Image: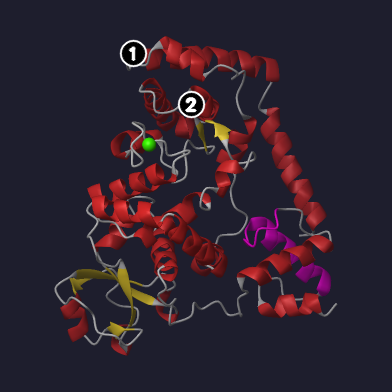
Amino acid sequence: MTLTRLAATSLLAFSALMAGFQPAKADATFDRCVQNLESAAANSGVRRDIFRASFAGVNGPDRDVLEKAKYQPEFRDQVWDYLDNRVNDEQVAKGQALRARYDSWLDRIERQFGVDRDILLAIWSMESNYGATLERQDVMKSLPQALATLACYDKRRAKFARQQLVAALKIVQAGHVAPRDLTSSWAGAMGHTQFIPTSYLAYAADMDGDGHANIWKSVPDALATAANLLRKNGWQSGRTWGYEVIVPAQYRGKLERDNKTIGQWANLGFRRANGRPFPDGGERANLVRPAGDNGPAFLMTKNFFVLKRYNNADKYALAVGLLGDRIGGYDGLRVDWPRGYKPLSSDERYELQRHLSRYGLYDGKIDGKIGSGSKAAIMALQERAGLPKDGNASKALLDFLRNR
Ligand SMILES: [Ca+2]
């Protein structure tokens, strides 16, 4: 597919989406819906003046929220694509700089919650790029408007959005955030560590001692809130999330997710990929092979599954664990992912995007992240140059571009 056709397709999709709205009628529907939300919130104990202050300036639905809610990525990420975009030299270096800057806060958070600082820094990176996302006008939304939009127009998310809106208004009512500062992602995730309102009510922690858990503006509060979530879900202090292991040949393709003690795994011939001994044979662990037999294998301990309470995906917990390890100065993986091509460094991914942009094939953000837009641009280039259209951001592709 050429880029022109791609653009035409997404324009068609966009027109189809917009055709669903008759603006004047939609706004009347929205106003009625917001009135219903106000009554429902009042029944849950939210004062009407709090509701109205929070909805001041909200005049209609946020159509960008609905567009984002309907977005289906054109390319399904392989686990290594996901990790390359999140666990890389750039995020490690930023994490290490912030580790030094927040050293005394991280000491206190570790003491109080028993969660390792590198894991908290990795979560901060994953959730908001260490807070940088909170500055992006194209990402940050008015939470009341975003959740009201979902509650009124997105059947699948309406119930969730109503519940989260009520929880958010209770946060305002308790005085933790001013109505005008109540911002979130399109789906209601708030602040540096992207808590949804009900999770905020369950785990919010005021680390800097000003009487409010301000996860939007206070980094200590946000990191302590993340630590509190992990602790309350069973985080094992002073322990790792898992071990990269070498799977004995006879167990290739077998024993997936089997739960045994580390000692039992060792008796089956499993050993650590870095050659060091396992520190504790009594700990229980599950075998996880995210890319099957030809990629890295892991024995995942309790903390891996606690990380999934933050976001219930193996690749998320793995990215947090691997990034945390690298921020803490430990090695990356010993076994490569079965990419089938040589990957690019962070700097090289920026360079690749600049080349693609120079050829007019890419108009997205130059951010070193190879997402759907970069992949479409790579495939357009590959088509134009008569190369196999695999969409991979490979060293070979960058060399090809450098030599033209
Ligand atoms: Ca505070």
**Ligand 1 image-quadrant field:** top left
Q: Is residue 357 above or below residue 245?
A: above
**In what quadrant of the picture does the N terminus appear?**
bottom right
Task: Check disc 1 and report its element: helix, strand or loop.
Answer: helix
Q: Which residue is mark 2?
A: 151
Instruction: Give the image location of residue 190, x and y in percent.
Output: 46, 38
The numbered dot on residue 124 is none
Q: Nearer the viewer, residue 385 or 216?
A: 216
Identify the residue at horizontal 61%, vertical 13% (top origin). Answer: 28
* Way the structure is coloured: secondary structure
**In what quadrant of the picture does the C terminus appear?**
bottom right
Amino acid type of disc 2? Answer: Ala
Q: Which residue is mark 1?
A: 43
Q: Nearer the viewer, residue 256 or 219?
A: 219
Instruction: Give the image location of residue 80, x and y in percent.
Output: 51, 69
Q: In the visual, does 404 lie left or right of 279? A: right
Q: Is residue 382 magenta?
A: yes
Amino acid type of disc 1? Answer: Asn
Q: Is residue 103 above or below residue 181?
A: below
Q: Nearer the viewer, residue 265 or 10?
A: 265
Provide the residue span drawn in magenta.
365-385
Q: Mark 1 to mark 2: distance in Å?
A: 17 Å
Instruction: Give the image location of residue 189, x and y in percent.
Output: 46, 39
Residue extending farthest left? 282
Quadrant in which residue 27 is drawn: top right
Is residue 183 among what the camera can see? Answer: yes
Instruction: Give the image location of residue 285, x and y in percent.
Output: 23, 70
**Mark 2 CB in 8 Å range of ligand 1?**
no
Is residue 82 among what the camera can see? Answer: no
Residue extending farthest front? 104
Q: Is residue 402 magenta?
A: no
